[in-house]
Amino acid sequence: MAVPLPDSVDYVLLDEDTIQQRVQALADQISADYAGIHHEDFILVGVLKGSFIFLADLARRLTVPHRVDFIALSSYAAGTEAGGTVRLIMDTRTDLTEHHVLIVEDIIDSGHTLDYLQRLFQTRHPASLRSCVLLSKPDRREIEFQVDYLGFEIPDVWVVGYGLDYADRFRTLPYIAALKPSVYS
Ligand code: 5GP
Ligand code: MG
C-alpha cells in the first residue's frame, strides 16, 4: 500500500524510480568522462545540506575512484525567501589545488550560489572544475551559469524531498514533491 503524502505536500514531481534512473545516467556519463583519473585527484564536493542524499546515491554509482568532501553555504533565511548574498559556513577539508573538482548541488535557482562557489574554487587553481546539479529552475535564473551535468529541469515551485527541505523538514522523503503554496506563502 502506498505511503500517504505528508499534509504539506501538494503533488509528487519526480518519483523514486525516475530519480534513480536519472542518477544512474549521470553517474555513467561522469564515470566515462573521468575515466583514468587517479582517485587522489578526483574529488566530489557536496554542498550541504541539500545535496547529501543525491551525492550519496551518485557517488556509489560511479565506477571511477574518487574522494568526497563537503562545503556548507547559506543563501536563504529559513523558509523559501531568496536572499542576495551567499555565506560560507564551512569550507572543504581538502586543498583543491591541482584536483579535478566536481561540485555536487541539489538545485540551481537564481544561480548565485553556484556562481559564488565557482569563483571561490577558481581561486584555488583546481586542475578542472565542473558541476553536477540534480534540479534546475530555468525561469528563476538571475545570473547565467553553465551546469555540466544536469538531472532535471523543473517549474518554479518550491520542492522538497531527496535532500531538499522546507525549514529543515522533508529531507528524507524518497521522492521530490511540490510543497503546498499555503505552507510558505
Ligand atoms: P540559488 O543561489 O541558485 O538561487 O539557490 C540555490 C539554493 O537555493 C539551493 O542550493 C537550495 O538550497 C535553495 N533552493 C532553491 N529552490 C529550492 C527549492 O525549490 N527547494 C529547496 N528545498 N531549496 C531550494
Ligand atoms: Mg543548496
Image: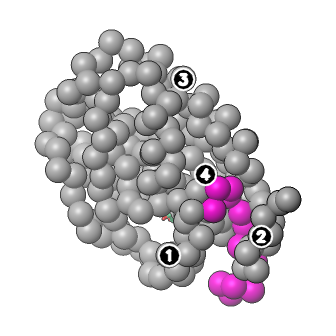
User: Picture coordinates of residue 79 (x, y %)?
Assistant: 54, 81
- Residue annotated with mark 2: 5
Q: Is mark 2 on a helix, strand or loop?
A: loop
Q: Going from the N terminus, do you reach mark 3 or mark 1 first? A: 3
User: Picture coordinates of residue 125 (x, y %)?
Assistant: 18, 36
- Residue annotated with mark 1: 168
Q: Residues within 10 Å of mark 3 (few under 14, many from 20)?
A: some
Q: Residues within 10 Å of mark 4 (few under 14, many from 20)?
A: many
Amino acid type at image mark 3 = Asp
- Residue annotated with mark 3: 28
Amino acid type at image mark 1 = Asp
Amino acid type at image mark 2 = Leu
Q: How crowded is mark 1: few (under 14 residues within 10 Å), some or many (20 or more)?
A: few
Q: What residue is shown at x 28% (from left), y 46% (from top)?
A: 69
Q: Which mark lies nearer to you, 4 or 3?
A: 3
Amino acid type at image mark 4 = Ser
In the figure, is residue 137 to the left or right of 52? right
Q: What residue is shown at x 20% (from left), y 27% (from top)?
A: 40
- Residue annotated with mark 4: 136
Q: Is mark 3 within 8 Å of ligand 2?
A: no
Q: Does the magenta stretch include residue 175?
A: yes
User: Picture coordinates of residue 116 (x, y %)?
Assistant: 34, 56
Q: What element carries label 4?
A: strand
